[in-house]
Amino acid sequence: MSLPPVIAIDNGGGNCKIGMAGQAAPTKVFPNASAKPKGERGALIADLLADSKEVSQLTLRRPVDRGYLCNLELQREIWSRGIRALLRRQPGECGLLLSEPLFNFEEIRSNTQQVVFEEMGFRSFYAAPAPVFSMHRAAGLLGASSPAARTGAGVIVDAGFSFTHIVPFFKGQVLEGGVRRINLGGKLMTNYLKELVSYRSLNMMDETYLMDSVKEQLCFVSQNVKADLKAAQNLARSPHRREFVLPDGVNNLRGYVRDPAAWAEKVQAIKDAVRAAESMDEKRRLASQMEADQVLVLNNERFMVPELLFHPDDVGLHQAGVAEATVQAVTATHAALAPLLYSNVVLTGGIASCPGFRDRFTTELRALVPDDHDLNVFQPQDPALFAWEGMSVFGSSRSYSSVALTKAQYEEGGGWAAHRQYS
């Protein structure tokens, strides 16, 4: 008997990853938000926002707040857009596999099931935290020769949009007493970058979507903060200086990182043309080309913003950094599990994609882990998609049908069925 198709949605606070279970990669990754361009009535939603050419002066609305689904009406619109326009599927023909936050509230679970079954009409439904699917995926990649894979043990470091969670596993189950959360994610980092550049350079406080793009293109994790700060003291000679050309709304709609060598050649060509021009009007017109672009200059902000992951107290969060929090998570479990857990540490989430993150994390964690324990830190090729890949494998197997709540069970059992699903 063939299984009905299953739609897998990794419903992150920042981005939504959607596709059919069994695929190697999601069909589409788009902002889990709607946005209204300034001065316009219509709103852009889901993939329309991702594919929009204009990225400045957007007012964002997100259905997820502080990691939890708070606006189900907006979320339903986003899901419906993704399912019908991108996947070209009807909910009544499919099951739904969804990621949810750790320690999700029962009321949110109940309301989500109501939307899934009563308003959208899915045939079946199952939801679990993203680290659970990441752990399944990691175990599959390790193979049976690994003790950690055989025992379903490991630590998932999920550095996402709203929070950073460190989640230990044993026998494939979350060790809830060891879960640690840092109240810091991609959203806070973007807001911090906005404040820094607005104080030092241009006012970018209303450009959340644009500054999120700047962060993803230019930020990196420093391996030696003191040395990098010293090198960045002289802005003109700093090796970390980068220039981002802001959108002008006419020819440049999304902004771009300006290549220093190409720009130097262009400036020299303009100077040569100015010297060769015969009239003053022509000289002024040519010279104005060097001042036409509005440029945002970034220097030490590029590495001081990701530094928050390792020192949250820089912005007043009295919490441990990501490496220290990982040790706290392992220490909170049974002492005999420590060697297994440290042998399988997996970095997931969009922040883990930041250049230099794995190297810095491994260096700091190795200094805190006992010398007689092997440490293996694994970073997938695309940490942001790793949980969805695990969902795809899970949703295309018979494991999904064995745990999913069917529409008939929901209609018959109501709240009892909802409790049974998550027990």
Image (tube, grey):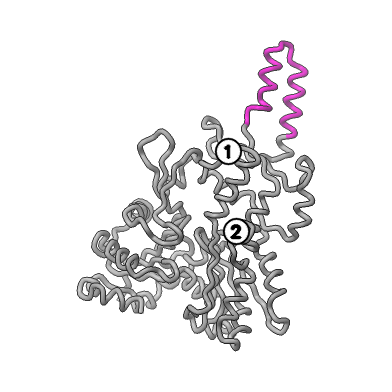
Q: Considering depth in this image, is 183 or 268 the residue closer to the camera?
A: 183
The image shows residue 158 at horizontal and vertical percentages of 54, 67
What is the chief secondary structure element of the magenta stretch? Answer: helix
Alpha carbons under labels 1 and 2: distance apart: 23 Å
Residue at left offset 75%, top offset 52%: 229
The amino acid sitting under disc 2 is Gly
Mark 2: few/some/many CA within 10 Å (<14, 14-19, 20+) = few
Q: Is residue 44 visible?
A: yes
| Numbered disc in front, either 1 or 2 | 2
Answer above or below: position of 28 versus 106. Answer: above
Mark 2 or mark 1, which is nearer the start of the sequence?
1
Q: Which residue is labeled 2 in the image?
A: 316
**Outermost residue, top side:** 279
Q: Report the side of 97 relative to 152 (left or right).
A: left
The amino acid sitting under disc 1 is Asn
**Which label was assigned to residue 222?**
none
The image shows residue 240 at horizontal and vertical percentages of 73, 48
Q: Report the side of 189 relative to 74 (left or right).
A: right
**Outermost residue, left side:** 412
Residue at left offset 58%, top offset 61%: 317
Q: Which residue is labeled 1 in the image?
A: 203
Instruction: Give the magenta-colored segment's residue range.
Output: 264-293
